[in-house]
Amino acid sequence: MAPTPLDAPYRLSPEHLDAFRERGYVRLPRVLDPETLRDAGTAVASEVAARNPLRDKPPEQRTTYERAFIQVVNLWRVNETVRRFVFSRRLARIAAELMGVAGVRLYHDQALFKEAGGGLTPWHVDQYYWPLDTPNTCTAWIPLQETPLAMGPLAFSPGSHRFARGRDLAIGDESEAVLSEALARAGFGEDAAPFALGDVSFHYGWTFHRAGPNRTERPRRAMTIIYMADGARLIPPARAEHHADRDAFLPGLAPGDPAATPMNPLLFHEKGEM
């Protein structure tokens, strides 16, 4: 029996691997087919509409973070179609091969919808929030429609996963101001490009990234899946965000414990152990 589109392997080239490890991210073409994206997108959009935490908050009363996007996490736990999408062996295998690890577990998923007219997403690194002892973490950013520059696709700072300045900044006005200057001064540029339907990007947890505002009249719908290397362990919390993430996504664990709870299933292992 032929594998489903969500399970079939994706062929990574040496250039893809080099780009990810040297630049800290890679955009991959034609990872997902339109039908798969349509089904997942319909399910994700339905759940976001039902669970939108900003539904009753006018834009003028929102923070910069809240104007950047609507965020809803762990939809795999409430919707079977989303669960099949998040548990995609195809995507998880890409994450493992890019990072050069034997297996990956789910940290969490999150829908990130930038409304029509939505604001910019400030410069930041994802791993600021994660109490994990490994640099082998990555996020798959999956736009659910064709995403031109005017819609605010994810943009990256090439090579910035090796840049330590600003790793202690939460996403917000300060991170945008400080990192815009610090990255430019250190010689790191910005790589912004449109995403065709089916393209997916992967970036390390320590890669600095941002997104422009959505200047179109349509929402920019994206789904993200965050992976961590199998065998990652918890570190002692260094900030309030570490405590919050541990309680939300790694419940019941203490520093030194393997980051493996029923909420962190093994999504791919090269030995086939699932």
Image (cartoon, rainbow, N blue to C red):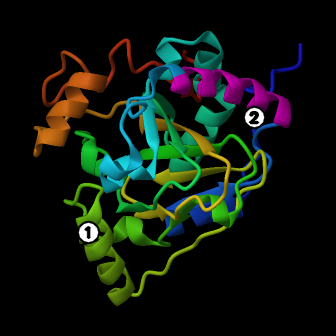
Describe the element under mark 1 as helix, strand or loop.
loop
Q: Residue furthest right?
A: 1
Residue at 32 percent across and 69 percent down: it is: 176
What is the span of residues highlighted in magenta in the rendered image?
34-49
Residue at 55 percent across and 56 percent down: it is: 117
* 263 vs 13: above or below: above
The residue that mark 2 highlights is: 9
Is 217 in front, or is 8?
A: 217
Quadrant of the rendered image containing residue 148: bottom right
Q: Indicate the amino acid at tag 2.
A: Pro
* 61 vs 183: above or below: above
- Residue 212 place in picture, x, y as percent: 52, 65
Q: Is residue 44 magenta?
A: yes
The residue that mark 1 highlights is: 164
* 130 vs 205: above or below: above
Q: Indicate the amino acid at tag 1.
A: Ala
Quadrant of the rendered image containing residue 233: top left
Earlier in the chain: of badge 1 and badge 2, it is 2
Residue at 29 percent across and 81 percent down: it is: 182
- Magenta portion: prevailing SS class: helix
- Residue 202 place in picture, x, y as percent: 56, 50
- Residue 46 place in picture, x, y as percent: 61, 21
